[in-house]
Image: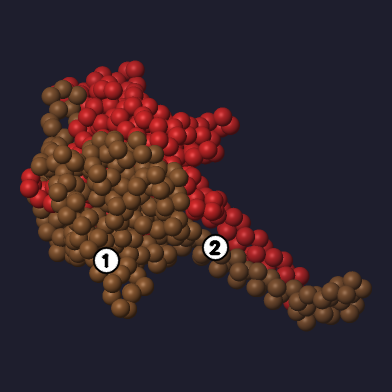
Amino acid sequence: MSDRRKAQSGRTVIFLLILLIIAALGWWWWRNGGAVLPPAGDPAPGEEDPLPDDDEPLPDDEEPADEPEEPPLLTDPDGAVFSYLPVGELLPSSGPGFVDETVYRTSIAFPTEDPVYLNSQVYRFGGGLGSVNGMNGAQCDARNYEYPWQDTFCEKRDRNQPLCPGGGHEGLDIRPHSCVKNVHWAVAVEDARVIDVRRHWVTLQTDAGTIYNYLHLNMSELAVAEGQQVRKGDRIGKISNDFFKSDGTPVPTTTHLHFEMYENYVAEPGDEPLFTKVNPYMTLVAAYERKLRGAP
Amino acid sequence: MTGQRRNLAAGGAQLGAKGMTMNAVPFLRRAAALAGAAAIFAAGAITHAQEDDAAAERLRAGAKERALTIPRENPPEIGAPAREIVEGGVNWTEMRTQLAISARRDISADQTVTRAVARPPGMRAASADRFKSVRAVEVNRAQVPVLAPEGDRIAATLKIYAQGDSYSATAEVADGVAMRMSGAKRKLVLGDAKAARAKFSAMRREQRTLQSVNAPYLITRSDSATDLSFAKFGAGYVLSLMCDEPDTDARCTGDDFIVGLASNLMLLNPEAGGE
């Protein structure tokens, strides 16, 4: 082989390697939403206080459009318009859902102090099955921390049960205001008794019998103890990702509050009651609405 | 031409005294092929990721379009509010009758020649004093029959928290399994009766009879518990089992263990509801 051919081969390799590097950089750039690296000190995704698109300030020289004004909508303390998807409307391929418009308790407090985002921990960015809907990314992806809320009751799991055909998630997953754990408080939704503190859950029960399960709080820093009577709005613990087996072995999960509600209910007076888990989605929508209006 | 030069001309490279020989051109070709394949792979990955991201963005955009908002002024009612009822209260007579039925069954079983190893299913009276972690004041506060499953580990770790119209009993059942049994006499009439009726009829078809209290039961499973629900004495009950491994532990994946637990119940306040 001549020196010329050797040199040519070498150049080809270098050229292809450069192409490869450019492609890899392009891929990295595109995966990060086309953004450049944030300057030091910028908040991480999910820790930001995202502004909704329609709240972006207009340039000074731009005149307001001469269109009829939309009625003002309910917003959260960050100024973001609160919105939610209908009950039972889950992400595609994530389970059957369960349509239940019932607001089980009409005067409960919302179970967190700060604004939150109800959505899937499994089928969204950072979830084990996020790729099912092209939602590849990390749990702190800012797109997880936005409205609208989405129901996750009867999201698909491998557990046989009649309420969610094919198996399902009988609770709601609540992302705290940011993906930083051990910062955001969960609070008692009603006057109740703390009846169980174990592994990674805290259970409350009211005089009426309603049971509320709070899962994945920071169990080493709870504000309550078993047997204690709590008042509506009292702090219980900080939202975290605690998840343990009974021998203390940790199980990985995202930073979120898994919230469950049991009720003793009948479809009509005179029926035998069923004391089971219920879908708290509309109950929480109504409680959040009251919270955003400043109700205790 | 030196030996090294000849080797190169033959398509190879020799590093002489350092003892390492390399065939330069095939190496370069392989490297080029590898780089090309990697570039193609990267291009494919980019395309795939772009498609994924486009799908995710379509979903987000669609969700934002369909999402419901709430006007600040004159908002519509949200959802279908439930209403709470207490109908009929607790049937204490039925409770005492059930206790007597169980006692008679136990006596008959004891008198049989074969002396069956397992006791017949039943509901038996048990004094709160028997349990080191149960406070009698809690049991006495309950205005509903306080039921809990039998078992040595349960008895050793049982706690009761009562609040008048409801109670809960918690305990360890065995290694890797905890339990909670709750009862309540107040009931909620569902607001979304249409959805509830359809679901209830399907659920009730699956019910079988719990022999300890002669009541139909239903089992459901979720991330946190396997639940057995039944209604008796005018109250609703739910026995929840929390397994370390809810997806693989047969005590939570199957029905036998939880039905077995619910088949032998203790009644901790047999004197409650007396005239």
**x then y, percent, for residue A288:** 27, 31
Front in this rendered view, residue B122 or A146:
B122
Subunit of mark 1?
B
Quarter occupied by residue B22: bottom right
Crowding around mark 2 (Cα neighbors within 10 Å: few <14, some 14 to 19, many 20+) is many
Q: Which residue is mark 1?
A: B107
Front in this rendered view, residue A181 or B73:
A181
Ranked by sequence position, the earlier of labels 1 and 2 is 2
Q: Residue at x 82, y 80 (%)?
A: B7
Q: Is residue B82 left or right of residue A60?
A: left
Quarter occupied by residue A225: top left
* Colour representing chain A: red
Q: Secondary structure at mark 2?
A: helix
**x then y, percent, for residue B111:** 28, 72
- Compared with B244, A212 (above or below) is above
Q: Amino acid at mark 2?
A: Ala
Whether label 1 touches label 2, CB < 8 Å: no
Q: Amino acid at mark 1?
A: Ile
**x then y, percent, for residue B164:** 25, 35
Q: Residue at x 34, y 70 (%)?
A: B118
Give the CA distance from mark 1 to mark 2: 82 Å
The brown chain is B
**x then y, percent, for residue A127:** 42, 52
Front in this rendered view, residue B130 or A56:
B130
Q: Is residue B44 visible?
A: yes
Q: Is residue A223 left or right of residue B109?
A: right
Quarter occupied by residue B201: bottom left
Front in this rendered view, residue B73 or B206:
B206
Q: Which residue is mark 2?
A: B39
